């Protein structure tokens, strides 16, 4: 794996306490292996504030403002004051999670719809979390209108869901899950997905790719995810890195040079 290649981690949570080495060392370690830019994701008021604070301290780091479906019950007004902050480049992560149902499903849908409208209003990309809720996710998106730049973070669907996302113009962001032995459906989606719609992420400190599975993840491991998918698709790693880096700058114009 060449350190001269440029990669972008479009989704990480480096404020989490178990990030290897802490946030500063994790960001530094990522830069050393060619991860030139990182987006730290807000999931509620506290993490959104932390994401913005971290981004303000690093030239190559940006933040999003979001209310995760788990936290939808907290109310969207807990995060909206941060939208105008410097280095905020997206809305989310937001969406629907029917696997855990930590918030009432009706509340999840209402808060998801409201964040879609925020993305439209502020002309910001939308970062979506969806689990066990594909049809309702599409229904809410179709009703509210897809933002021009929409990202399905940590894509875990199969090829059918991938096609439904891409038909709506969305990007699919692949994480270390694609390396897991049980993830044949995600691999099929990664093989099928048109190259102009592929993004990469770690979701650090979660979902470390093989051979690091079971350990805390970090942005420095995004080249492992990218190299794995490039090999899966039969593409040159350097070309794949260049293309996904370009995609990230198109999906999140706020991070573009």
Image (cartoon, rainbow, N blue to C red):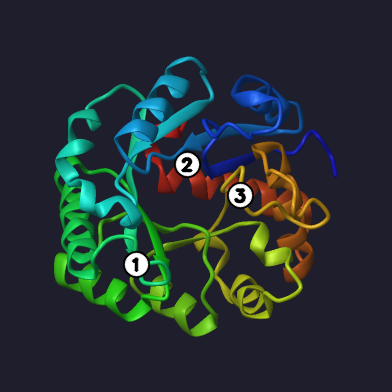
Closer to viewer: mark 3 or mark 1: 1
The answer to whether residue 62 is left or right of residue 44 is: right
Question: On the image, numbered disc 3 is attached to which residue?
Answer: 206
Residue 203 visible? The answer is yes
Circle 2: element type: helix
* Pointer 3 or 1: first along the chain: 1
Q: Secondary structure at mark 3?
A: loop
| Horizontal relation, residue 103 to residue 231: left or right | left
Q: Position of residue 41 (x, y in %)?
A: 43, 40
> Total marks drawn?
3
Q: Within the image, what quadrant is residue 131 found in? A: bottom left
Which numbered dot is residue 101? 1
Q: CA distance from mark 2 to mark 3?
A: 23 Å
Crowd around label 3: few <14 · some 14–19 · many ≥20 (10 Å): many
What label sits on residue 249 in the rendered view? 2
The furthest residue to the bottom? 160
Q: Could you tell me which residue is drawn at 58 percent across and 63 percent down?
A: 195
Which one is nearer the viewer's eye here, 29 or 96? 96
Which of 59/157 is in front? 157
Nearer to us in this view, 100 or 199:
100
Relative to 188, say whether 200 is above or below: above
Gap in Å between the C-alphas at discs 1 and 2? Answer: 33 Å
Q: Nearer the viewer, mark 1 or mark 2?
A: 1
């Amino acid at each position: 794996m060449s350190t001269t290649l440029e990669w972008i981690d479009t989704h990480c949570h480096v404020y989490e306490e178990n990030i290897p080495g802490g946030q500063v060392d994790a960001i530094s370690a990522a830069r050393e292996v060619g991860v030139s830019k990182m987006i730290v994701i807000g999931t509620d008021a506290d993490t959104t504030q932390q994401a913005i604070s971290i981004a303000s301290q690093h030239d190559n780091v940006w933040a999003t403002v979001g209310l995760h479906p788990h936290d939808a019950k907290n109310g969207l007004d807990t995060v909206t004051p941060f939208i105008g902050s410097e280095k905020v480049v997206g809305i989310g992560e937001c969406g629907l999670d029917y696997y855990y149902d930590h918030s009432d499903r009706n509340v999840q849908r209402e808060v998801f719809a409201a964040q879609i409208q925020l993305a439209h209003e502020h002309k910001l990309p939308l970062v979506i979390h969806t689990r066990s809720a594909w049809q309702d996710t599409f229904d809410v998106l179709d009703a509210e209108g897809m933002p021009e730049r929409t990202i399905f973070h940590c894509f875990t669907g199969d090829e059918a869901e991938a096609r439904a996302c891409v038909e709506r113009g969305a990007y699919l962001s692949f994480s270390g899950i694609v390396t897991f032995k049980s993830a044949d459906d995600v691999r099929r989606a990664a093989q099928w997905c048109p190259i102009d719609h592929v993004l990469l992420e770690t979701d650090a400190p979660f979902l470390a790719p093989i051979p690091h599975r079971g350990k805390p993840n970090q942005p420095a491991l995004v080249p492992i995810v990218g190299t794995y998918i490039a090999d899966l698709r039969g593409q040159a790693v350097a070309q794949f890195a260049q293309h996904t880096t370009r995609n990230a700058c198109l999906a999140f114009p706020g991070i573009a040079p």
